Image (cartoon, rainbow, N blue to C red):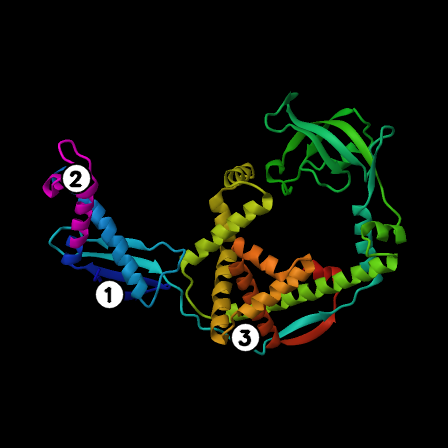
Amino acid sequence: MNATKEVELLENSQVKLTVRVPTADVAQEYESIVKEYCDKAHLKGFRPGKVPRDVIIRKLGPSLIDQTRAEVLEKSLSEVFENVEKKPIPYATPEIKSESALELGKDFSFEVVYDTYPEVALGPYAGLEIDQPEWEITDEDLGRELKGIQEQNALFTDKDQGDVQVGNIVNIDYVELVAGAERPGTKREAFVFEVGTGYNVYKVDDDLVGMKKGETRTITKIYPEDFETKPLAGKTVNLRVTLNSIKEKKLPDINDELAQDISEKFQTLDDLKADIRKKLEDAVKAALRSRTVTRVLDTVVETSTFPLPSSMVDYQLEAMWQEYASRLGLEEKQLTQLLEQQGRTTEDIRKEWTPSAEKRARMQLVLSEIAKKEGIAIEESDLDAEIAKMAEERKVTAAELKESIQKSNLDAYMRSNLRMDKLYDFLLSKTVIRHSGRQKVLDILQGN
């Protein structure tokens, strides 16, 4: 197809193409469609493949023109996009803005508008000065981690006698009451949580203290206007609670025996402490690396100039929506229903997330431009080295792991991650680190 095009650059990194398809190409496409029908149509009174051209045209008339239009649009767009310098963003849908009616014996022309990747004028990214705190692993840090391990290895025993105390694990049934009747949709059975953690919607921890197994209570809760669960904010709720069971938590002693129970590689408590220290050090280094890279990129994004296509923002919003649903373990319909219960809509969420989506899109463009400018790429040897490292950790051969990765179509994903790591290493090598004050390990890990 010999389509011609006129290119016009619009604002916000959009392109308008005016495409003209010659009369001969339109006629050729039309005749090709007619011939296919003649060859394949089954009409009464005609043998297969022997239906005359004029019969097909008379019976199918306008639909042949419609099919020709669709084919001409698809093929001419494919051709011009292949040859145009400013190509469409892959996930953005080009929009047909105007077109002439397709008539046999005439050229067919139309206009299409689409988003393209913008020209990025990068801000400085080498020699940036970033503050980073001094830090050290303390006995307090080791003690906190050991306490967590102790909690993870706790034993739970039934508490048939006595009442609920803070720290007990309870199993309860509950339902909201309105004028003494159960409110539909609020009933929950066999709900389990630890009293004192607040891991329950109605925050009934304190109200359960003193209850005995098998006891039923009606609890009245008055929630403030700024309560974290929006449907309950500013409301008074009557809740009927039945206590099904109580379990007591028994913590193991922190000693050599606990260390040995955790892993056969630990013989003493000191072995466990050394392992905790090493993991904390690695975690802090990773957190500071991530924080520094983020600050460098935030600075570069802020000082770079380029238009941002709306399709890139929409793409990031959709990705954020999918990530949110995945994090909550919900299908899209369930997530929409959850938002409705909170008095919000998907449009509210999109509006709330738009600044973050714009930032993510800008970050993506800046990263891509730096990688292109600095020639940062992943060689086959880089991929093989990473696979060998992973294989050693997993106690399998590199060949086995590589085959598994290729079968799962994960090699492109790995290359992308390795390229980002390589880019981050490059940026860090060009960054000036200024040590400023000391910071607790926990604050660093929590992103404070």
Query: Which residue occupies the foreground of this view, 232 or 73?
Result: 73
Q: Main secondary structure of the magenta part?
A: helix
Q: Position of residue 172 (x, y in %)?
A: 73, 30
Q: Residue 6 carries which label?
A: 1
**Disc 1 residue type (three-letter):** Glu
Marks 3/2: CA–CA distance:
63 Å
Q: Give the range drawn in magenta.
A: 28-57
Residue 239 visible at all: no
Direction from residue 32 to residue 284 in the image, left or right = right
Q: What element carries label 2?
A: helix
**Disc 2 residue type (three-letter):** Leu
Asked if the residues shown at circle 1 and circle 2 are in contact, with their CB atoms under 8 angstroms apart, the answer is: no
Q: What element carries label 3?
A: loop
Q: For mark 2, does the 10 Å Cα neighbourhood hold few (<14), some (14 to 19), or many (20 or more) residues? A: few
Q: Which residue is denoted by mark 2 in the rendering?
A: 60
| Residue 205 drawn above or below residue 129 | above
| Residue 311 drawn above or below residue 83 | above
- Mark nearer the viewer, 3 or 1: 1
Question: Which mark is first along the chain, 1 or 3?
Answer: 1
Write down the quadrant of residue 164 in the picture.
top right
Q: Which mark is residue 125?
A: 3
**Disc 3 residue type (three-letter):** Tyr
Query: Which residue occupies the foreground of this view, 446 or 275?
Result: 275
Image point 66% across, 72% down: which residue?
131
Marks 1/2: CA–CA distance:
34 Å
Marks 3/1: CA–CA distance:
37 Å
Residue found at the far bottom of this picture: 127
Q: Where is residue 291 in the image (x, y as percent from the top left)?
A: 64, 65
Q: Position of residue 300 (x, y in %)?
A: 53, 71
Q: Is mark 1 on a helix, strand or loop?
A: strand
Q: Residue 385 carries which label?
A: none
Image point 58% across, 73% down: which residue?
427
